[in-house]
Amino acid sequence: MASSTASTATPVRHTFERRVEDVKPLKGDINALILDYLTTEGYPSAAAKFSKEANLRPQQEEESVKARRQIQHSIHSGNIQEAVDGLNELEPQVLDSNPSLHFALLRLQLVELIRTCNATAGGDITPALNFATTQLAPRAPTNKEFMEDLERTMALLVFPSDSLEPPLAALLQPGLRQSVADRVNKAILACQNQRRDAAIRSLVRLRAWAENTAREAKRDLPATIELGLDGDERHEVHENGHEPMIT
């Protein structure tokens, strides 16, 4: 009887993949990227712990990062007045020098007031109307986009929340809070003469641009190139399910 033997031949790897593996980034450079991300995105405890373990100098004072993080947390939680108060205490010139950001925060605060009104049947809309009249209406005529945003937001008082058109429904989704929080975070960093985006985000964009450029030039590349952030079965995994920290 003829016996069959499963093939054990090693798959041929693309030349590009072999060249990538030959590049050995310095651990110090990787650690600096990690610390930069934790600091820029506002993770004070993680940044402080990692800087000690990796023997790196903190990029910002921990208290400053904590204050910036608390402002973001307040926005994500819908406590916009708390965020505005914290922002004015940390960097009071941010809102004075950025009318668009100030209006975005006020508009989000109006959205949260309307959300509260609509949470119960027959909810009192007076707080939302008063806020819109005193805080947003005087600013809206100075900018066409401000006026459009205000009109769109006030429509939330007119239509049932369960039958809103997508553009209106989006105002009540977490994405609006996220967007405003990101803008505030970047504005604070710019005011503090810090980079507005984590360096690793710029590297990812640069990597995508390089791959697209190479493919347009018909360079010899693998069909797909993994970004390398997800890990695979070859990586060491600790008991907590995470890869080891590079130190």
Image (tube, rainbow, N blue to C red):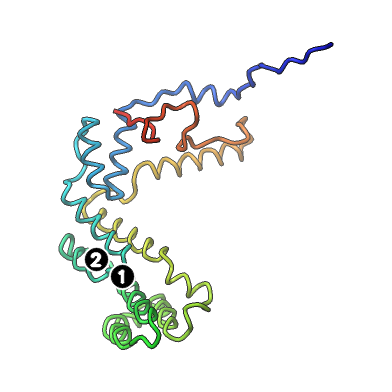
Q: Residue at x 29, y 35 (%)?
A: 32
Residue 31 position in % (x across, y down): 30, 33
Name the outermost residue toward the top: 1
Q: Nearer the viewer, mark 1 or mark 2?
A: 2
Residue 110 position in % (x across, y down): 33, 77
Image quadrant in which the N terminus is located: top right
Q: Indicate the amino acid at tag 1.
A: Leu
Image quadrant in which the C terminus is located: top left
Name the outermost residue toward the front: 1
In the picture provided, is 238 more to the left or to the right than 230? Answer: left
Task: From the viewer's side, name the closer residue of 188 and 162.
Answer: 162
Snapshot quadrant of residue 172: bottom left
Depicted 142 relative to depicted 214: above or below = below
Q: Residue at x 39, y 32 (%)?
A: 243
Depicted 158 relative to depicted 113: above or below = below
Q: Which residue is mark 1?
A: 105
Question: In the drawing, what numbered circle is on residue 236?
Answer: none
- Other-residue count near label 1 (Cα within 10 Å), few / some / many at <14 / 14–19 / ≥20: many
Residue 107 position in % (x across, y down): 34, 75
- Other-residue count near label 2 (Cα within 10 Å), few / some / many at <14 / 14–19 / ≥20: many
Q: Which residue is mark 2?
A: 83
Residue 73 position in % (x across, y down): 28, 59
Depicted 122 relative to depicted 203: above or below = below
Q: Secondary structure at mark 2?
A: helix
Task: From the viewer's side, name the closer residue of 73 and 227.
Answer: 73
Kindly indicate whether the residue at mark 2 contacts the one at mark 1 (C-beta within 8 angstroms).
yes
Task: From the viewer's side, name the closer residue of 36 and 170.
Answer: 170
Q: Secondary structure at mark 1?
A: helix
